[in-house]
Each structure stands twice: as structure tokens, then as C-alpha cells.
Image: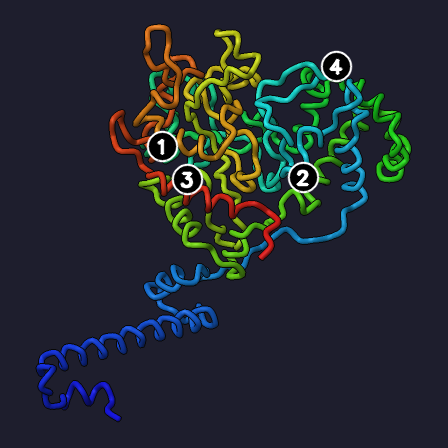
Amino acid sequence: MNHPSDAVMRPSPPTGDEPGPVIIRRAWLRLLAWCAGGLVLALVVLGAYALVYPERMPPAVGAIVEDITGANPHPAQLMRPPAAPLSAVALLGKQIFFDRTLSASGVQSCATCHSPQHSYAPDNAFPVQLGGARMSEAGYRPPPSLAYLYRQAPFSIGPDQGDTDAPVDMAQLATQAAGTQRAQKTALAAPAAPAAPAAPAAPAMVPQGGLFWDGRADTLQIQALGPLTNPVEMANATEADVARKLLHTQYLDQFKKIFGPSVVNNPSLLISEALFAVGRYQIEDQSFHAFTSKYDYWLEGKARLTHAELRGLRLFNDKDKANCAGCHLSQPSRDGLPPLFTDTQYEALGVPRNPAIPANKDPKFFDMGVCGPFRDDLAQQTQYCGMFLTPTLRNVAERKVFFHNGVYHELRQVMDFYNLRNTSPEKIYPRDASGKVQKYNDLPVQYHANIDSADAPFDRKPGDRPAMTDQDIQDIIAFMKTLSDGYKD
């Protein structure tokens, strides 16, 4: 029997029916088929080798293998919060978290707006929640998720980069900010001072940290007090009302055991310890920071991403395309802490006004985030008007409303906003009576310069090609779905 290579090297003499060139072409085709089969086999072997010994693969080869297998060629070791039974204080906090009797209506608890089954966000698609003594008062913003707040720093204003230790003079900051365009997320160079380093100029100072959409609470304890005394939420008129309700709870004896019998005689101390317990519950209970998404397991080399998910991840990180990772950080920290998918900073994005919010029926009402109306300490810092906290994207696919005003209900709508806000604003914003597009219609015009138009995908003009194609958007959404906790292979 002739080997295929023999036919090529020593072709048989032509017969009367087949000319010699035909036989040679057929031999070459057999040789090409044999080589193609060998290449496929080599890629399969290479992929198997990479799965067993990923650390031995060169980066270029690793990228090819990643496309084939969906595995992470460079697994990381993530440092999750330690798992341990809840302390007595945290167990007390859990009871407080679910206690409806602490509200004026008697039917609303912390868990009413922060459902454990919905990543500690609302379990409905209302743009704002109802509360008050009769559960008929509408709020102003959709409650953000309470998940993944365990590493949130207190609110501050400082340089995005750099190592200045100069204190921030808020009055001077307001003066410096007059006429500036917007607070930049990349620090600008500070002018040199003859004697000592000068504080960064106002545009270089970035709001960061804090809780609520406007960062007005610095700790989980302070955050927990807000809804208890908010007239459109749990609606206690005073903190004394909260203390009286605590004295009638079924877990009062636990307060005495943990904090001493005299705690019931001091209303302010009783409230303080109750809020401390709620904070401890959120810190200790792993369900608030589970890190059990498919992406977490992919980072550790324990799961594979599909082609669409991998492509979505690349687009998510691409600073010239979606640029999501510019604010929603996707890489583990240097010491192995899992990514929170937020830089905990503030941005003015210019999302359209939501007419479904009752407060927005007043054309003079504007929710301007950091500079008001629900915090007044930064009212003079007009360079921050329209800025809201960047939320985590963990469990984002499970949310039912998006942005500080709940104007969107689907991830596709969110991505279309980012993609078309500048290139086709008529598809994002309403028109006035004259037919003019009302761009940035949820922020007074004098603050429009604060809105980000420099970073991709907003660095485009009307009529330009959008940063993302329809397929790009589908792939990015596929990736964001890998951020949901509770993944099962």
C-alpha cells in the first residue's frame, strides 16, 4: 500500500484515462487534508495542556486558548471576607433589619426595600417606593442595593490620583471652581507653590465614598437611621419614637444581655446600639458580599466564559469602546480583593428625567445629587451638581430599575443610553413643543457643563458612528449577566 507521501514523491505513471497532473493535484489535496487534521489535533492537545498547566503558557498562546476553551489563562486567588457564624450583635441586627414594627405604618422594614432575594434591592420595578405612615407617600429615588458596601469608605473630596496631603478648604474650592467645566476623574497637575505643595485645583478634586446616591451617610449605622426617620419611608417623627418602638420589641432582652440592662434607660444609646447591630449584620452576613458569580469563578480558573461573554468582557474593559471599567473596576486589587465593579466615585451622566416620579411633576424640582436637595453641605459646590454615586454592577442583571431616578428598566435601555446619548440624542430625550430635543432635561442648564462628554462612549458628536454595535451591546450584556451571585456550573 502506498503512503500518501509516496504518491507525491513517486507518482504512478499516468493511465490512459487520467493525465499525470490530475494525479499530482489529488495527491496534494490529500496532503493538505492530512496537514489540516494535524493542526486541529495540535490545537486540541494545546488546549488540553493549557487547562492542566495554564501557568506555563506564553501570553500570546494563552489568548488563543482562552478563545477556544473560555478558561482564564491567568487565574487569581481571591481574598473573600472570612466565613463565620454571626455574632450575637449581628444576630440582633438581623432581627432589627426584618422588623416591621419599627415603622410608623407597622408594615415596612429595612428588608421591604432591600430584599435579600433581590440582592438587597427592591423586589419590584417601581421607580420609587411607597412609604409613610399610611404607605402612600412616594420617595424621590429608587433605593440602591445594600450589597457589597463592606469596603465603602466615608465620603470625601480629593484627588483621583496623586499623593497630596493638603487639607481641602471647601470655601476656597467653591471659589476656584467658578467657571470650570466639570470635575475631572483624572487629576490635573497642581500649580507649584514657592514654599509648600499647593492643593489640587478644583476640577481635579473628585467626590468619592459615602452611602446613598449622594454620599451623605458615612457609615452603615448612619445609613440605617435615615429611612427610620424619613417621612416618605418608615416615617418615625423623631428618634425618640424609634426608641419607644425598640422598647416594645420581642428582642429587648437581647439588648440587655449584649449591652447591659441600663441600655433601656438611655434612648439615644439604645438607638445607637440598634444601628450598630444592623451595621454588624451587613458586615458579617456573607449574603451581603457573596462573591459567588460566574465571573468570580472565572477569575479563579474554576469556570469558563462563553465566546459572547469573553467578547463582552473585552468590550467592557476597552477604554475606546464601552469603557465600562473606567468607573466599574473589573480587576482584583493587588492584594487579591475581588473587584467591586465600582470606583465609588461620582459622575454626572445626564440621564433623562423620569416623569413617573411624582416629585418631577413640579418643573422647578431637580434632584442634583451631591449638591442637593437632600444634602445641603455642598450646595455651593456647583461643579458637582448632577453627580451621583457610581453603583456596583454586581447582580446588575437582577435589578429592575437603573440610575438614580429609575428611568430605565432593562439593561438594553441602559446600554442604548450610553451608546446614543451624544450621537443620536433625539432617541434618548423628549422634544419640547417646538420640536427641539431637550437634552440633559433633568438638570438645570447652568450645570450642563458638569456632565461627562470627554470619556468614551460619550466622546462623540451628533451624527458620529456610535461606539458600540448592536452585537457589541448584546455581548456586553451577556458578560454583565456573569456578575450575578449564586452561579452553579
Residue 278 visible in the picture: yes
Residue lying at 39% horizontally and 50% vertically, measured from the top left: 311
157 on left or right of 427: right
Instruction: Please give the residue where the numbered disc 3 appears in the rendered image.
Output: 324
**For marks 2 and 4 on the same chain, the one whose residue lies earlier in the sequence:** 2
Identified by mark 2, the residue type is Gln
The image position of residue 281, as x and y in percent, is 72, 40
- Label 1 sits on residue: 419
**Tags 1 and 4 touching, CB below 8 Å:** no
- Residue in the picture at 9% in, 86% down: 16
Q: Height in image: 157 above or below 78?
A: above
**Of helix, strand and loop, which one carries label 3?**
helix
Q: CA distance from mark 2 to mark 1?
A: 31 Å
Asked whether, in this view, residue 304 is left or right of residue 254, the answer is left
- Name the secondary structure under disc 2: helix
- Asked if residue 99 is positioned above or below residue 25 in the image, the reply reads above
In this view, the mark in front (2 or 3): 2
Q: Which residue is mark 4?
A: 134
Q: Earlier in the sequence, mark 2 or mark 1?
A: 2
What residue is pinned by disc 2? 117
Depth order, front residue of 488/378: 488
Q: In the rendered image, is residue 162 in sight? A: no
| Marks 3/1: CA–CA distance | 12 Å
Identity of the residue drawn at 78% across and 23% down = 107
Image location of residue 31, percent across then percent down: 22, 79
Q: Amino acid at mark 1?
A: Asn
